[in-house]
Amino acid sequence: MRTETEPTEASRQYAAVYAAHYIGHDLPLALQLYRQLMASHPSAREAGYAWMQVQNIVNAVVPKQELLDAQIKLVLAHFEHDGLLDAGRPPGTQLSEENDEVQGEDHWRDDGGKG
């Protein structure tokens, strides 16, 4: 005996968004619809799939160095907000943005700092 499960609203939405993303190649629309799906069905497994697809879009659109720079600024802002930035560190070892130029050097990158 075979039981057919009825597709959920979240699964129908995900199928439509996925088609816009991979068949229509409309990344701005796909991003908007993935975000709507995550907001309207946050506990559905499709919200997790949508989150992964948003990450795919971000990685396809935003240059790696720009993404890394934004992530570093975000974590520094969180450290500062939480009082962790420079807390109890000896002079010269602070992590504040004044040291960004030193911390942001591209000598470690495989592409020679080209993005």
Image (cartoon, rainbow, N blue to C red):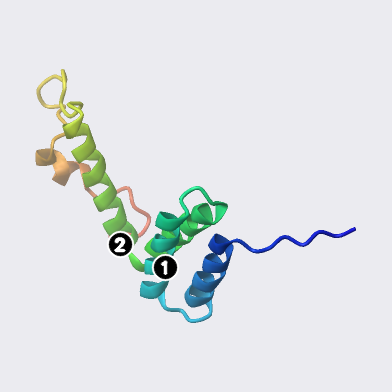
Instruction: Locate the N terminus by quadrant.
Output: bottom right
Instruction: Locate the C terminus by quadrant.
Output: bottom left
The amino acid type of the residue labelled 1 equals Leu
Observer able to see residue 106: no
Q: Mark 1 — residue?
A: 33
Q: Nearer the viewer, residue 61 or 11?
A: 11
- Residue 111 in the image, given as x and y percentages of width and height: 35, 60
- Residue 4 in the image, given as x and y percentages of width and height: 77, 62
Could you tell me how far apart the alpha carbons at marks 2 and 1 are, in whole angstroms?
A: 29 Å
In the displayed structure image, the side of residue 76 where residue 97 appears, left or right: left
Q: Mark 2 — residue?
A: 115
Identify the residue at horizontal 17%, vertical 26% (top origin): 83
Residue 67, quarter of picture: bottom left
- Residue 86 in the image, given as x and y percentages of width and height: 15, 26
Badge 2, how many Cα within 10 Å: few under 14, some, many 20+? few
Residue 81, quarter of picture: top left
Identify the residue at horizontal 58%, vertical 63% (top origin): 11
